[in-house]
Image (cartoon, rainbow, N blue to C red):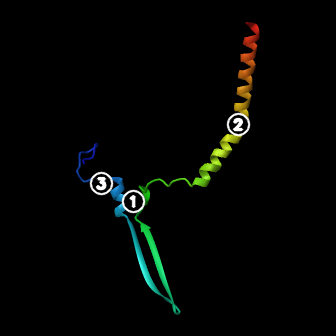
Amino acid sequence: MNCPKCGSDNTQKLQVVFEQGTYGDESKGYVGSAPVTLQTTGRSLLAAKYSPPKKAAPVLTILLGLIVAFCLGPSLTVARTFSRVLENGSKHKQ
C-alpha cells in the first residue's frame, strides 16, 4: 500500500497503528495474605488518536429515541389531522 500523496511505501492501516500502540500488563501479588491481580492497559498517543469510535450505549440510544419521539409526536399528529381534514373537505366538494 502506497501513500496517495507522496507515493511512499512506508504506510500502515489505521487498524494496525491502533493495535500495535495498545498494550496491556498483568501483575499478581498479595495484599496481606489476600492474592491480588492488577491489570493495566495503555495506548500510545498515535493509537489513542486513531482509535475506533466508541459505540453508543444502548440506554443512551433508547433515551435519544424517546426524546425525538416525544418532540415529533405532536407534530405528526397535527399533520395527520390536517391531512384528514383536507381529505374530508375534498370529498364534500365532489
* Residue type pointed to by label 3: Gln
Contact between marks 3 and 1 (CB within 8 A): the answer is no
Name the quarter where the C terminus is drawn.
Answer: top right
**First in sequence: mark 3 vs mark 2:** 3
- Given this view, does label 3 or label 2 mark the residue nearer the observer? 2
Q: Quadrant of residue 50?
A: bottom left
Mark 1 nearby-residue class (10 Å; few <14, some 14–19, many ≥20): some
- Mark positioned earlier in the residue sequence (3 or 1): 3
- Give the left or right position of residue 51, taking residue 4 as reference: right
Distance (Cα) linking label 3 and label 1: 12 Å
Quadrant housing residue 93: top right
Circle 2 crowding by C-alpha within 10 Å: few under 14, some 14–19, many from 20: few
**Which residue appears at 38% of the width and 59% of the height?**
18
- The disc, 1 or 2, on the residue closer to the chain's N-terminal end is 1
Tell me the residue at 63%/47% (across/down). Answer: 64
Tell me: residue 76, above or below residue 13: above
Read off the residue under disc 3: 12
Q: Which mark is residue 73?
A: 2
Q: Who's the residue at 39% across and 69% down the image?
A: 23
- The image position of residue 71, as x and y in percent, is 70, 39
**Above or below 29: residue 60:** above
Name the spot of residue 84 as percent of width and height, x first: 73, 21
In the displayed image of the protein, which residue is found farthest to the bottom? Answer: 33
Is 44 left or right of 1, judged from the image as shown?
A: right
Asked which secondary structure carries label 1, the reply is helix
Give the labeled residue for mark 1.
46
Looking at the image, residue 43 lies above or below residue 5: below
Q: Which residue is nearer to you in this view: 3 or 17?
A: 17
